[in-house]
Image (tube, rainbow, N blue to C red):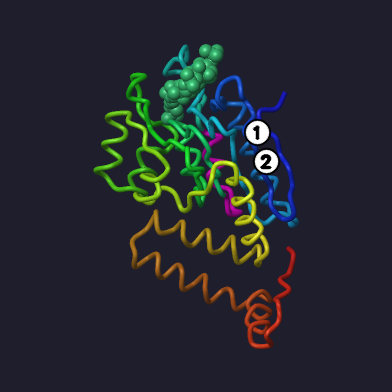
Amino acid sequence: MTTIIIEKIGRAALIRLNRPEALNALNRQVAKELADAAQSFDRDPDIGCIVITGSEKAFAAGADIKEMQPASHREMYGQDWFADWDRFAATRLPTIAAVNGYALGGGCELAMMCDIIVAGETARFGQPEIKLGVMPGMGGTQRLTRLIGKSKAMELCLTGRLMDAQEAERCGLVARIFATAELEAKALEMAQTIAGFSRTIAMMTKETISRAEEVSTVEGVRFERRMFYSMFGLEDQREGMAAYIEKRKPEFPRD
Ligand code: CAA
Protein backbone atom coordinates (compact mmCIF):
# COMPACT_ATOMS: atom_id res chain seq x y z
CA MET A 1 0.00 0.00 0.00
CA THR A 2 1.35 3.38 -0.92
CA THR A 3 0.29 6.58 0.79
CA ILE A 4 0.51 8.79 -2.28
CA ILE A 5 -0.90 8.64 -5.81
CA ILE A 6 1.32 9.93 -8.58
CA GLU A 7 0.24 11.08 -12.03
CA LYS A 8 2.19 12.70 -14.84
CA ILE A 9 0.08 15.30 -16.66
CA GLY A 10 1.92 16.95 -19.52
CA ARG A 11 5.19 18.22 -18.05
CA ALA A 12 3.77 18.42 -14.51
CA ALA A 13 3.73 15.74 -11.82
CA LEU A 14 0.70 15.58 -9.56
CA ILE A 15 1.24 13.93 -6.18
CA ARG A 16 -1.92 13.30 -4.19
CA LEU A 17 -1.71 12.43 -0.50
CA ASN A 18 -3.87 9.37 -0.03
CA ARG A 19 -4.70 8.49 3.56
CA PRO A 20 -8.39 9.46 3.58
CA GLU A 21 -9.03 7.46 6.76
CA ALA A 22 -6.68 9.78 8.66
CA LEU A 23 -7.33 13.10 6.82
CA ASN A 24 -3.94 12.56 5.11
CA ALA A 25 -2.03 12.60 8.41
CA LEU A 26 1.66 12.53 7.61
CA ASN A 27 3.28 9.39 8.96
CA ARG A 28 6.86 8.38 8.23
CA GLN A 29 5.85 6.32 5.22
CA VAL A 30 4.28 9.42 3.61
CA ALA A 31 7.47 11.40 4.25
CA LYS A 32 9.65 8.72 2.68
CA GLU A 33 7.40 8.20 -0.34
CA LEU A 34 7.01 11.92 -0.99
CA ALA A 35 10.74 12.54 -0.71
CA ASP A 36 11.54 9.57 -2.98
CA ALA A 37 8.98 10.72 -5.58
CA ALA A 38 10.22 14.32 -5.57
CA GLN A 39 13.83 13.18 -5.93
CA SER A 40 12.93 10.94 -8.84
CA PHE A 41 11.15 13.83 -10.61
CA ASP A 42 14.25 15.98 -10.06
CA ARG A 43 16.02 13.43 -12.26
CA ASP A 44 13.21 13.17 -14.86
CA PRO A 45 13.79 15.58 -17.76
CA ASP A 46 10.14 15.23 -18.84
CA ILE A 47 8.88 16.85 -15.63
CA GLY A 48 9.32 20.56 -14.91
CA CYS A 49 7.08 21.20 -11.89
CA ILE A 50 5.47 19.21 -9.06
CA VAL A 51 2.00 19.79 -7.57
CA ILE A 52 1.21 18.31 -4.15
CA THR A 53 -2.43 18.08 -3.15
CA GLY A 54 -4.78 16.27 -0.79
CA SER A 55 -8.55 15.85 -0.77
CA GLU A 56 -11.35 18.39 -0.64
CA LYS A 57 -11.64 17.90 3.13
CA ALA A 58 -7.96 17.87 4.00
CA PHE A 59 -4.64 18.71 2.43
CA ALA A 60 -3.16 17.10 5.55
CA ALA A 61 -4.36 17.31 9.17
CA GLY A 62 -0.83 17.17 10.58
CA ALA A 63 1.89 14.72 11.47
CA ASP A 64 0.36 11.39 12.46
CA ILE A 65 -0.52 11.81 16.14
CA LYS A 66 -1.29 8.10 16.57
CA GLU A 67 2.12 7.09 15.22
CA MET A 68 3.98 9.70 17.31
CA GLN A 69 2.12 9.41 20.61
CA PRO A 70 4.06 6.41 22.06
CA ALA A 71 7.48 7.50 20.73
CA SER A 72 10.26 8.20 23.22
CA HIS A 73 12.83 10.97 23.06
CA ARG A 74 15.45 8.32 22.27
CA GLU A 75 13.47 7.13 19.21
CA MET A 76 12.62 10.62 17.98
CA TYR A 77 16.15 11.93 18.33
CA GLY A 78 18.00 8.68 17.56
CA GLN A 79 16.06 7.99 14.37
CA ASP A 80 15.78 11.69 13.50
CA TRP A 81 12.04 11.11 13.04
CA PHE A 82 11.42 13.94 10.55
CA ALA A 83 14.65 13.59 8.52
CA ASP A 84 12.85 12.59 5.31
CA TRP A 85 11.15 15.99 5.30
CA ASP A 86 14.57 17.61 4.79
CA ARG A 87 14.96 15.45 1.68
CA PHE A 88 11.57 16.61 0.42
CA ALA A 89 12.31 20.27 1.22
CA ALA A 90 15.52 19.97 -0.80
CA THR A 91 13.57 19.21 -4.02
CA ARG A 92 15.21 21.17 -6.85
CA LEU A 93 12.19 21.42 -9.16
CA PRO A 94 9.56 24.08 -8.37
CA THR A 95 6.79 22.71 -6.12
CA ILE A 96 3.22 23.93 -5.69
CA ALA A 97 1.02 23.01 -2.73
CA ALA A 98 -2.65 23.00 -3.75
CA VAL A 99 -4.52 23.20 -0.44
CA ASN A 100 -8.20 22.41 0.02
CA GLY A 101 -9.59 21.86 3.51
CA TYR A 102 -7.33 21.43 6.52
CA ALA A 103 -3.60 22.19 6.37
CA LEU A 104 -2.79 21.83 10.06
CA GLY A 105 0.43 21.24 11.96
CA GLY A 106 2.71 19.18 9.72
CA GLY A 107 0.20 19.73 6.88
CA CYS A 108 0.74 23.47 7.03
CA GLU A 109 4.47 22.82 7.38
CA LEU A 110 4.48 20.60 4.27
CA ALA A 111 2.66 23.34 2.33
CA MET A 112 5.33 25.81 3.49
CA MET A 113 8.12 23.50 2.28
CA CYS A 114 6.65 24.00 -1.20
CA ASP A 115 7.57 27.05 -3.27
CA ILE A 116 4.04 28.31 -3.95
CA ILE A 117 0.87 27.72 -1.94
CA VAL A 118 -2.46 28.04 -3.74
CA ALA A 119 -5.65 27.55 -1.74
CA GLY A 120 -9.25 26.62 -2.30
CA GLU A 121 -11.81 29.02 -0.79
CA THR A 122 -12.47 26.70 2.14
CA ALA A 123 -8.84 25.96 3.05
CA ARG A 124 -7.87 26.35 6.72
CA PHE A 125 -4.34 26.75 7.98
CA GLY A 126 -2.98 26.44 11.49
CA GLN A 127 -0.30 25.18 13.86
CA PRO A 128 -2.41 23.70 16.66
CA GLU A 129 0.38 21.55 18.17
CA ILE A 130 0.27 23.47 21.45
CA LYS A 131 -3.06 21.78 22.13
CA LEU A 132 -1.24 18.43 22.03
CA GLY A 133 1.47 19.51 24.44
CA VAL A 134 4.09 20.01 21.73
CA MET A 135 5.02 22.65 19.16
CA PRO A 136 5.58 22.61 15.38
CA GLY A 137 8.41 20.20 14.53
CA MET A 138 8.60 20.09 10.73
CA GLY A 139 9.92 23.61 10.23
CA GLY A 140 6.81 25.61 11.18
CA THR A 141 8.36 27.88 13.81
CA GLN A 142 10.95 29.02 11.26
CA ARG A 143 9.11 29.02 7.91
CA LEU A 144 5.85 30.49 9.25
CA THR A 145 7.73 33.29 11.01
CA ARG A 146 9.64 34.17 7.84
CA LEU A 147 6.49 34.04 5.73
CA ILE A 148 4.01 35.95 7.91
CA GLY A 149 6.12 37.72 10.55
CA LYS A 150 6.80 37.13 14.22
CA SER A 151 3.65 38.53 15.81
CA LYS A 152 1.20 36.51 13.70
CA ALA A 153 3.35 33.35 13.83
CA MET A 154 3.47 33.64 17.63
CA GLU A 155 -0.27 34.20 17.79
CA LEU A 156 -1.08 31.16 15.63
CA CYS A 157 1.41 28.81 17.34
CA LEU A 158 0.60 29.96 20.88
CA THR A 159 -3.20 29.94 20.58
CA GLY A 160 -3.63 27.10 18.06
CA ARG A 161 -6.17 29.25 16.15
CA LEU A 162 -6.90 28.31 12.53
CA MET A 163 -7.01 30.90 9.76
CA ASP A 164 -9.06 30.82 6.60
CA ALA A 165 -7.80 31.12 3.03
CA GLN A 166 -8.54 34.86 2.78
CA GLU A 167 -6.53 35.66 5.90
CA ALA A 168 -3.73 33.36 4.72
CA GLU A 169 -3.57 35.22 1.41
CA ARG A 170 -3.63 38.65 3.11
CA CYS A 171 -0.69 37.73 5.32
CA GLY A 172 1.42 36.33 2.48
CA LEU A 173 1.22 32.61 3.19
CA VAL A 174 -0.92 31.91 0.12
CA ALA A 175 -0.18 33.16 -3.40
CA ARG A 176 -3.66 32.73 -4.97
CA ILE A 177 -7.13 31.59 -3.96
CA PHE A 178 -9.34 29.62 -6.36
CA ALA A 179 -12.82 28.10 -6.16
CA THR A 180 -12.56 24.79 -4.32
CA ALA A 181 -13.65 22.70 -7.31
CA GLU A 182 -11.21 24.45 -9.65
CA LEU A 183 -8.17 24.37 -7.39
CA GLU A 184 -6.48 21.31 -8.85
CA ALA A 185 -6.96 22.41 -12.46
CA LYS A 186 -5.67 25.92 -11.68
CA ALA A 187 -2.63 24.55 -9.84
CA LEU A 188 -1.88 22.24 -12.77
CA GLU A 189 -2.27 25.13 -15.22
CA MET A 190 0.27 27.11 -13.18
CA ALA A 191 2.56 24.06 -13.11
CA GLN A 192 2.34 23.64 -16.91
CA THR A 193 3.23 27.32 -17.36
CA ILE A 194 6.32 26.90 -15.18
CA ALA A 195 7.23 23.57 -16.78
CA GLY A 196 6.93 25.11 -20.24
CA PHE A 197 9.94 27.34 -19.59
CA SER A 198 13.54 26.20 -19.35
CA ARG A 199 13.79 23.54 -16.63
CA THR A 200 17.33 24.57 -15.73
CA ILE A 201 16.48 28.27 -15.48
CA ALA A 202 13.40 27.48 -13.33
CA MET A 203 15.59 25.41 -10.96
CA MET A 204 18.20 28.18 -10.81
CA THR A 205 15.48 30.76 -10.11
CA LYS A 206 14.11 28.61 -7.29
CA GLU A 207 17.57 28.12 -5.82
CA THR A 208 18.26 31.85 -5.95
CA ILE A 209 14.94 32.97 -4.41
CA SER A 210 15.37 30.35 -1.69
CA ARG A 211 18.69 32.03 -0.79
CA ALA A 212 16.72 35.05 0.41
CA GLU A 213 15.65 32.99 3.43
CA GLU A 214 19.18 31.97 4.30
CA VAL A 215 21.56 34.89 3.83
CA SER A 216 21.73 38.69 4.13
CA THR A 217 20.32 40.84 1.31
CA VAL A 218 23.83 41.88 0.23
CA GLU A 219 25.02 38.26 0.00
CA GLY A 220 21.74 37.22 -1.65
CA VAL A 221 22.06 39.89 -4.33
CA ARG A 222 25.66 38.80 -4.94
CA PHE A 223 24.50 35.19 -5.34
CA GLU A 224 21.72 36.31 -7.71
CA ARG A 225 24.20 38.24 -9.82
CA ARG A 226 26.52 35.21 -10.10
CA MET A 227 23.61 32.94 -11.05
CA PHE A 228 22.37 35.50 -13.59
CA TYR A 229 25.79 35.81 -15.24
CA SER A 230 26.11 32.00 -15.33
CA MET A 231 22.87 31.80 -17.36
CA PHE A 232 24.79 33.38 -20.23
CA GLY A 233 26.71 30.12 -20.45
CA LEU A 234 23.47 28.32 -21.34
CA GLU A 235 21.74 27.87 -24.66
CA ASP A 236 18.48 28.65 -22.80
CA GLN A 237 19.39 32.33 -22.52
CA ARG A 238 20.47 32.64 -26.15
CA GLU A 239 17.32 30.89 -27.39
CA GLY A 240 14.92 32.79 -25.06
CA MET A 241 16.26 36.21 -26.01
CA ALA A 242 16.63 35.38 -29.73
CA ALA A 243 13.01 34.15 -29.82
CA TYR A 244 11.86 37.43 -28.27
CA ILE A 245 13.74 39.47 -30.86
CA GLU A 246 12.60 37.23 -33.74
CA LYS A 247 8.98 37.39 -32.44
CA ARG A 248 8.57 33.61 -32.16
CA LYS A 249 7.98 31.05 -29.38
CA PRO A 250 11.22 29.87 -27.73
CA GLU A 251 12.28 26.22 -27.97
CA PHE A 252 14.08 25.54 -24.72
CA PRO A 253 16.37 22.53 -24.40
CA ARG A 254 14.60 19.63 -22.70
CA ASP A 255 17.33 18.51 -20.33
N1 CAA B 1 -2.97 12.23 13.13
C1 CAA B 1 -3.59 11.04 13.17
N2 CAA B 1 -4.89 10.87 12.87
C2 CAA B 1 -5.59 11.97 12.53
C3 CAA B 1 -5.01 13.24 12.49
C4 CAA B 1 -3.63 13.35 12.80
N3 CAA B 1 -2.97 14.52 12.74
N4 CAA B 1 -5.95 14.15 12.11
C5 CAA B 1 -7.11 13.44 11.94
N5 CAA B 1 -6.88 12.13 12.19
C6 CAA B 1 -7.85 11.03 12.14
C7 CAA B 1 -8.81 11.11 13.30
O1 CAA B 1 -8.24 10.56 14.47
C8 CAA B 1 -9.98 10.31 12.78
O2 CAA B 1 -9.67 8.94 12.89
P1 CAA B 1 -10.78 7.92 13.57
O3 CAA B 1 -11.92 7.94 12.59
O4 CAA B 1 -10.03 6.63 13.62
O5 CAA B 1 -11.14 8.52 14.88
C9 CAA B 1 -9.98 10.64 11.30
O6 CAA B 1 -8.69 11.16 11.00
C10 CAA B 1 -11.00 11.71 10.93
O7 CAA B 1 -10.78 12.84 11.76
P2 CAA B 1 -11.92 13.51 12.67
O8 CAA B 1 -13.01 12.54 12.98
O9 CAA B 1 -11.25 14.19 13.82
O10 CAA B 1 -12.50 14.61 11.63
P3 CAA B 1 -13.23 15.98 12.01
O11 CAA B 1 -13.78 16.50 10.73
O12 CAA B 1 -14.15 15.79 13.16
O13 CAA B 1 -12.04 16.96 12.53
C11 CAA B 1 -9.85 17.99 12.43
C12 CAA B 1 -11.04 17.38 11.64
C13 CAA B 1 -10.31 19.30 13.12
C14 CAA B 1 -8.76 18.28 11.43
C15 CAA B 1 -9.39 16.97 13.51
O14 CAA B 1 -9.19 15.71 12.89
C16 CAA B 1 -8.10 17.34 14.19
O15 CAA B 1 -8.10 18.20 15.07
N6 CAA B 1 -6.98 16.68 13.84
C17 CAA B 1 -5.68 16.90 14.47
C18 CAA B 1 -5.07 18.22 14.01
C19 CAA B 1 -3.72 18.44 14.70
O16 CAA B 1 -3.64 18.55 15.90
N7 CAA B 1 -2.64 18.48 13.91
C20 CAA B 1 -1.29 18.63 14.42
C21 CAA B 1 -0.63 17.28 14.54
S1 CAA B 1 0.91 17.31 15.41
C22 CAA B 1 2.04 17.85 14.27
O17 CAA B 1 1.73 18.08 13.13
C23 CAA B 1 3.44 18.02 14.80
C24 CAA B 1 4.39 18.67 13.85
O18 CAA B 1 4.48 19.87 13.72
C25 CAA B 1 5.28 17.87 13.05
Cα distance between the residues tagged 1 and 2: 6 Å
Amino acid type, callout 1: Glu
Residue found at the far bottom of this picture: 246
Whether residue 75 appears in this view of the structure is no
The percent position of residue 11, horizontal first and vertical second, equals 72, 55
Residue nearer the viewer, 95 or 212: 95
Q: Residue at x 48, y 52 (%)?
A: 176
The percent position of residue 61, horizontal first and vertical second, equals 49, 28
Rendered view: 30 above or below 48: above
The percent position of residue 135, horizontal first and vertical second, equals 35, 28
The circle drawn on residue 37 is 2
Q: In the rendered structure, are the residues bearing label 1 and label 2 in contact, judged by CB atoms less than 8 Å apart?
A: yes
Whether residue 161 appears in this view of the structure is yes
Bin the neighbour count of mark 1 within 10 Å (Cα to Cα): few under 14, some 14-19, many 20 and up. Answer: some
Residue nearer the viewer, 49 or 120: 120
Residue range corresponding to the magenta coloring:
83-95
Q: Residue at x 67, y 44 (%)?
A: 14
Amino acid type, callout 2: Ala
SS at badge 2? helix
The percent position of residue 169, horizontal first and vertical second, equals 40, 49
Quarter of the image that includes the C terminus: bottom right
